[in-house]
Amino acid sequence: MYDAGTISPMKQIDALAGTATSGSPRNVAPASTDPSAIGVVLTEFTALRNEIDNLASAHRTMINLNLTVVVAVIGLVLANRVDQHLLLALPLASAAIGLVYQWYVLHAKNIGDYIDQTLRPLLAEYTNDDRVLAWEHQLRTTVYRRRGSAIAGQLSYILLFPSVPVVSLVATVHILDTPWYWVAWCTGVVLSVAQLTIWWVQARHWVCWT
């Protein structure tokens, strides 16, 4: 995604308004362009990019949390320190974490769509240059549609999240000896199905999951 970096908004305004010459007529804004209008768009863009960065940090936090829970539970069970029924916690915990992760991903996608569909056309109109803020558009039309990129993102998500609840559900089906264990197991099934359904719907729209 496009990153404003350390360039100040005023310098970006000057560059986009045509004070920095590049030799290309498309980079020179019309004389009627109001730098303040460009500044408003860049300010909103910067705020949205910061929010995307925060969501990216939240993505990594969810991944680390999921891995920590999975490793801890499986390690305790394999070491025979706890009852095998503790595995029933994995479909609940991992699926819940995965659903939160999916919400973060979808929220970041919605922000990117707004940048691509609203802010980019505005800035292109103000600057008479349709190449500005083009990274979000590039992601949606090229990067996410590459078969290797799409498959890698989807498989990595499956391995990190849905695979854990599914394996846990299969491994614990033979030890459901009380109604409460059945309730926990069925709840895990519902959460896992919800997680996989959301993944399937969004995977069809080339959402980048990692």
Image: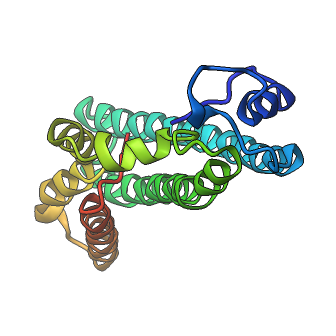
Is 77 placed left or right of 29 in the picture? left
Question: Between residues 185 and 13, which one lies in front from this camera angle?
Answer: 13
Residue drawn at x 67%, y 49% as measured from the top left: 123
Question: Between residues 44 and 166, which one lies in front from this camera angle?
Answer: 44
- Give the total of numbered labels: 0
Q: Quadrant of residue 77?
A: top left
Question: Between residues 23 and 137, which one lies in front from this camera angle?
Answer: 23
Q: How is the image coloured?
A: rainbow
Residue 45 place in picture, x, y as percent: 70, 46
Residue 202 place in picture, x, y as percent: 32, 63
Residue drawn at x 74%, y 30% as measured from the top left: 18
Residue drawn at x 56%, y 34% as measured from the top left: 2
Q: Quadrant of residue 15?
A: top right
Residue 144 place in picture, x, y as percent: 30, 45
Is 127 placed left or right of 160 in the picture? right
Is 72 placed left or right of 175 in the picture? right
The vertical placement of 76 against 36, above or below, is: above
Q: Could you tell me which quadrant the C terminus lies in?
A: top left
The vertical placement of 40 against 192, above or below, is: above
Is 157 placed left or right of 35 in the picture? left
Residue drawn at x 29%, y 54% as measured from the top left: 206
Residue 30 place in picture, x, y as percent: 73, 45
The vertical placement of 85 against 143, above or below, is: below
Question: Between residues 4 and 121, which one lies in front from this camera angle?
Answer: 121
Q: Quadrant of residue 63?
A: top left
